[in-house]
Image: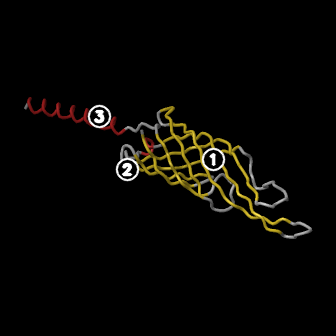
Amino acid sequence: MKKIKIALTLTLIIAGLNLAAQEKAHQEDYGNTLNLGIGIGYYGYVGHSTPVIHIDYEIAVAKYFTLAPFVSYYSYTDYNTWVDPQNPYWNYSYRETVIPMGVKGTYYFDKLLGAGPRWDFYLAASLGFVITTTTWENGYEGSTTVNNRPSPLFLDLHAGTEYHLSKKAGLFLDLSTGVSTLGLAIHF
């Protein structure tokens, strides 16, 4: 009977150590992640759908919190009408290239939500500025002011998730007040 108690005690200790080791092995190390995404629209600059390319690199700053410098890119063409006494209602076009950049702060809620090791859930905010270049149609001599531009500074709020395909790669969906992005996360 004493041997059974000792065997049972040893089994429970080994099982407990094994569970603790598994828990430690499944704890995710946030940060050191390159996120490559594509999406539609961006930060109120565009009144129509425009493809966007986005890249950021997450750096761990606390247990469940990362900061990610980012840059995005999109370009679109818009058409306006210029009223000229010599040529009334002349249609013209211009192309805008927009490059938002800044820092995205992300807080992960995996532990709070009891998410499994393959899932990440987060809320985030981006703060940054926008570089804009406008090219006007050849021959256009009217106003070169684009009136639909908001401030070059912005704040964007995000909610997102990532599904880990492996320890090194995952797919993410980031929904925000500016753009919805789908992409690949590469963990280093």
Name the residue beneath numbered marker 2: 165
The nearer-to-camera label among 3 and 1 is 1
Give SS at disc 3: helix
Give residue 156's mark: 1
Inter-mark Cα distance, 3 to 2:
22 Å
98 or 65, which lies in front?
A: 98
Q: Residue at x 49, y 52 (%)?
A: 183
- The amino acid type of the residue labelled 1 equals Asp
Q: Is residue 83 above or below residue 21?
A: below
Q: How many marks?
A: 3
- The amino acid type of the residue labelled 2 equals Leu
Inter-mark Cα distance, 2 to 1:
28 Å
Crowding near the residue tagged with mark 2, few <14, some 14–19, many ≥20 C-alpha atoms within 10 Å: few
Q: What x and y, as percent, mark residue 40?
A: 59, 58
The nearer-to-camera label among 3 and 2 is 2
Q: Is residue 73 left or right of residue 95?
A: left
Q: What x and y, as percent, mark residue 18?
A: 25, 35
Which label's residue is closer to the chain start, 3 or 1? 3
124 or 87, which lies in front?
A: 87
- The amino acid type of the residue labelled 3 equals Ala
Q: What x and y, as percent, mark residue 14?
A: 21, 33
Name the residue beneath numbered marker 3: 21
Q: Residue at x 42, y 38 (%)?
A: 188
